[in-house]
Image (spheres, grey):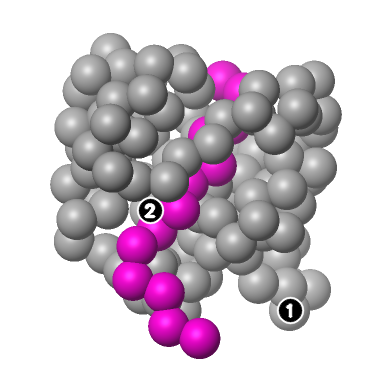
Amino acid sequence: MNQLFIELYLDEDVDVLVADLVGARGFAVITTRDARNIGAGDREQLAAAVNGGRAFFTHNRVDFERLAEEYFTAGLEHRGIIIAVRRSPYEIARRLVAILNNVTADEMKESDSIHLFS
């Protein structure tokens, strides 16, 4: 099944204002709070994104690079992981929208990769 637009799941460490700003641009975004997963571990957070068919967005580079490697080694798929250096919610949203406008959901999934931006 082809999917054009990336849908996002924002990790607990991401300011919820980012979801509002990106959502206002017409993109589907949920937060850990929306998913009622506050306090869940990294594995559970990523699993929630995978189960919802969403790419995962976080500031937690070390743990999610490791989890991505575990998924790859185990032959598991995710919908992509986007990791960003902490910036203002407005700057994060601007950069996320740029990714969402230039990368399709299928491209994100096919690459089964981590996308970093600083």
Question: Residue shown at 77%/29% (left/top)?
Answer: 37
Question: Residue shown at 66%/23% (left/top)?
Answer: 33
- Looking at the picture, which amino acid does disc 1 mark? Gly
- Which corner quadrant of the image does residue 95 belong to? top left
Which label is found at residue 115? Answer: 2
Question: Residue shown at 47%/64% (left/top)?
Answer: 113
Asked whether 108 or 117 is in front, the reply is 108
Which residue in the structure is indicated by mark 1?
Answer: 75
Magenta span covers which residues?
1-13
- Looking at the picture, which amino acid does disc 2 mark? His
Q: In the drawing, does residue 117 fall left or right of residue 62?
A: left
From this viewpoint, is residue 111 visible? no
Question: Residue shown at 24%/51% (left/top)?
Answer: 99
Q: Earlier in the sequence, mark 1 or mark 2?
A: 1
Q: In the drawing, does residue 99 fall left or right of residue 44?
A: left
**Disc 1 from disc 2: Cα separation:** 19 Å
Indicate yes or no whether the magenta region holds residue 98.
Answer: no
Q: Where is residue 39 in the image (x, y as percent from the top left)?
A: 80, 20
Asked whether 90 or 86 is in front, the reply is 90
Q: In the drawing, does residue 69 fall left or right of residue 38?
A: left
Secondary structure mostly taken by the magenta-highlighted segment of the chain:
loop
Considering every residue shown, the one lying at the far bottom of the view is 1
Q: Where is residue 25 in the image (x, y as percent from the top left)?
A: 23, 38
Q: Is residue 85 above or below residue 8?
A: above
Q: Where is residue 108 in the image (x, y as percent from the top left)?
A: 41, 67
From this viewpoint, is residue 7 visible? yes
